[in-house]
Amino acid sequence: MPFEQARRLQALPPYLFKELDRMRDEVKARGVDIIDLGVGDPDRPTPPQVVEALGRAAADPANHQYPAYSGLNVFRDAVAAWYGRRHGVRLEGGRHICSLIGSKEGIAHFPLAFLNPGEVVLVPEPGYPVYHIGTLFAGGETRFMPLLEKNGFRPDYRAVGEETLAKARIIWVNYPNNPTGATVDLKFYEDLVAWARRRNLIVASDAAYSETTWSEKPHPSILEVPGALEVAVEFNSLSKPYNMTGWRLGWAAGNEELIQGLGRVKSNIDSGVFQAVQLAGLAALEGDQEPVRAMARLYRERRAVLTEGLLAAGLSVCPSEATFYVWVRLPDGLSSAEFSSRLLNEAGILATPGRGFGPSGEGYARFALVQEAARLKEASARLARLKF
Ligand SMILES: *Cc1c(COP(=O)(O)O)cnc(C)c1O
């Protein structure tokens, strides 16, 4: 290759799904009807009132110029008001909120604002790959914190050594969790904030699935902890609750200096989110929230349908009250790569091997509930014919 990629790209973790993608194409070419439960991308459309709001806003020439880089004030105020309603937290849009081109963008860019080369970021695994990749791109070093089932898939951050902590600047957490489906209570965030304040660490909390829950109470936000605004920033997104992954709209909320730093990076790289998309997002946040609750109920039903087949196949399902993932424990001795390959070849079902999310994901597989119940019923029937 005449143009060798930069070392920062060469340092990226290998694409573990490459082999799975190849197998999928091969199985597909044999004419097998594949049920794809691989990628976590909602299958249902965005609520129509949001699409209509985009149409109106897109027609307004006032929205055709460069947006304000930290976000439209009315959108930031709407996010602040949402924190008041959902979490009882008082924030000011202009001080504590920054619009993002999807939360992935903010998660990836955040370390550029606060991490110097050689400094350390504490990252949970199995987990969303972007915490590590953002660290790499900023020249930092990742120390992974395993999420183990026996600890409720919570990181044992107190076990991180003093030498590492001396170089650490940021700790990432993600609840409700992708891929394990684990949730936490406010106490978890209280302890984490107290610990981080003593050590002058930034807590970055990824709350992308905060609305995809079906328990009685809303899942807590780290910003509910008194004093959290000293150290914490929360990333959230319209992608999952409103089926808006294609729209690219999210936000960061929290400590004012952290928001400013992130905004400064963004002002030098992108120029913010199309205003019409932010106005549509505002309509989503301020409109009827029944579609969000209905999606959560739907995922719960779908989960029940798939679980039947998984149990019939002799597999073990990790209980969860949130996200649209099912995290499945495999029998001892069966690797997640072997499992996914067997599932694809013998049942035409695509699930993600847990190893793809980190070494502690070995021995597990993730099923994304992004197909209608009828398809999941078919998946369940195919599963029930296998024995693991
Ligand atoms: C889907 C997802 C996101 C971000 O999605 P965006 O579309 O970029 O807002 C962030 N974190 C986790 C864990 C996710 O699964």
Image (tube, rainbow, N blue to C red):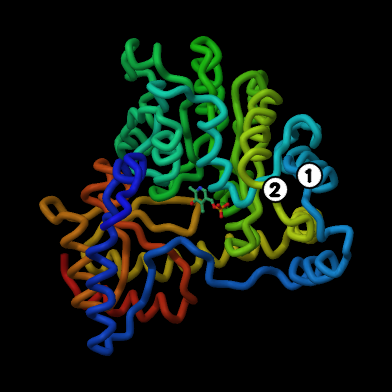
Which of the 4 image quarters holds residue 232? top right
- In the image, residue 63 sits, relative to residue 262, either above or below, namely below
Q: Earlier in the sequence, mark 2 or mark 1?
A: 1
Question: Who's the residue at 60% across and 36% down the image?
Answer: 234
Mark 2–mark 1 CB contact (< 8 Å): yes
Which residue is depicted at the point 74% across and 73% down? 48
Work out which quarter of the rendered image holds the C terminus and state it: bottom left
**Neighbourhood count class around disc 2 (C-alpha, 10 Å): few under 14, some 14–19, many 20 upward:** many
19 left or right, relative to 212: left
Q: Position of residue 121 (x, y in %)?
A: 42, 27
Confirm or reject: label 2 Cβ below 8 Å from ligand 1: no
The answer to whether residue 82 is seen in the rendering is no
Residue wearing tag 2? 272
Furthest residue toward front: 2
Q: Viewed as shown, does residue 143 lie left or right of 111?
A: left
State left or right for residue 380 relative to residue 284. left
Residue at 76% across, 54% down:
278
How much space separates mark 2 and mark 1, taking CA atoms? 6 Å
**Viewer-closest of 308 and 292:** 292
Would residue 58 be seen by someone viewing this image from the given angle?
yes
Q: Name the residue under label 1.
A: 68
Secondary structure, mark 2, is loop
Q: In the image, what residue type sits under mark 1? A: Ala
Q: Does the residue labelled 1 lie within 8 Å of ligand 1?
A: no
Give how far across and how far down residue 27 sits, in percent.
24, 80
Residue 140 x %, y % = 40, 28
Q: The N terminus is located in which quarter?
A: bottom left
Depth check, front residue: 181 or 40: 40
Q: Residue 163 carries which label?
A: none
Residue 240 pos. (x, y %): 58, 57
